[in-house]
Image (cartoon, rainbow, N blue to C red):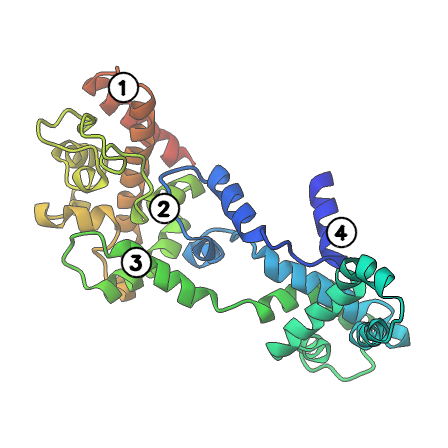
Amino acid sequence: MCTFSQLFFHCTVKKKPDAWAQCELEALQRLLPGPQHWFQVDALRSLQLLGFPKSIPDLHALSVAIRFRVASRENSRYGGLCACHRNYHLKATTRRCDFLARLAKWSNWIESSALASLSEAVQTCGVKGVTAAGIESDIAEGAARPWTAEVHRRVQRQFQRQTVTSISEGARPQLEKTMRNKLDRWKIAVLPRCRVDRAIAALPCVAKKIPPRALAAVIRTLWNGWCTGRRFQNKEHQCMFGCRFGQDSIEHYGTCTKVWDFFAAHFPPEHTPRPDDRLTAFLLLNTASAQAAAHVEKLRSYALLVAATYLTHNTWRHKLGIGHTAVIEAMAQHLLELRAG
């Protein structure tokens, strides 16, 4: 908590470091371990659209919003901080400075001053058409001035959040772009655009019926995020269920006879797909986007199967000596725990 408090205080007066993007990527790779490039950072900012309670925050937008709030709301009773005006005069004064040696020594400090940082945030928001008056009007929902105490508190409380929303790029286009790139690799009889629509429609529906870790396993599956032998070009690893010619790969597990025999034993028979439709069902892409809500129980069955298979694969990967019977037992235990929540 102390670290976050210091970080947010730093954001009120300082610009984002140049190396921030790389540091953020490295931190997320530690948080979400797996094969390299299995996720895109921008897509993680749209996880709410896929059914998660929260998305990974855009800390750049948050930093700009914090500084914009400080510049716009602090000292508002007396006209605000006037950061842009004061920064302009500071720069004009330095240009007229006769003490060149002193100016050279202090130039970095002046350029990274709180005034310069706040001014940059105001200008960034201005380029996107975001103004303090517009943010306040959106939050107040057109309420006439003078505001009531309740409206004033709401504006004060939601100003920064509304600013983040206003300056952030559209989340859905970036999510659709990532989804299309990730889903193109699967050899299934569904058109690329329909794959994206089906995934974005199915995941929020099924998210209400399964625990978050199961939803995370489904997304990791769609984005090819399993640590399989094929993903790491390790031909020695074969199917964990002992299939004679089966690869250790998502493509194989999506069509593996042992996986679907397990499905038939633990799920309603009417949810069992045709043999040539197994991989599509394993990816939750065999239901039209307009029918996702109507077939949510079937999608839930597939999602639980995917999550149980993924968790079992992790167990098997760290204990390569376990037998095929133990793998099936582990899968049944994982499914029991997933159904319990």
Frontmost residue, 332 versus 98:
98
Give the vertical position of 177 relative to 123 (above or below). Answer: above
Under mark 4, the amino acid is: Phe
Residue 181: which numbered mark, if any?
A: 3
> Residue 38 has which mark?
2
Q: Position of residue 290 (x, y in %)?
A: 28, 66
Residue 129: image quadrant is bottom right
Measured in 3D between alpha carbons, the distance from the residue under mark 2 to the one under mark 3, in whole angstroms, is: 11 Å
- Image quarter where the N terminus lies is top right
Q: Earlier in the sequence, mark 4 or mark 3?
A: 4
| Disc 1 versus disc 3: nearer the observer | 3
Left or right of 142? Residue 324 is left
Give the alpha-carbon distance from disc 2 to disc 1, as whole Å: 24 Å
What is the x, y in percent for residue 243?
A: 12, 28
- What number is the disc on residue 320? 1
> Quarter holding the C terminus?
top left
Residue highlighted by disc 4: 9
> Circle 1 sits in a helix, a strand or a loop, which is it?
loop
Name the residue at 36% across, 51% down.
206
N-terminal of the two: label 4 or label 2? 4
Question: Element under label 4?
Answer: helix
Q: In the rendered structure, which amino acid carries the disc numbered 2?
A: Trp
Circle 3 Cα neighbour tier, 10 Å, few/some/many (<14 / 14–19 / ≥20):
few
Mark 2 vs mark 1, foreground winner is 2
| Kind of element beneath mark 2 | loop
Label 1 Cα crowd, 10 Å radius (few <14 / some 14-19 / many 20+): few
CB of mark 1 within 8 Å of CB of mark 4? no
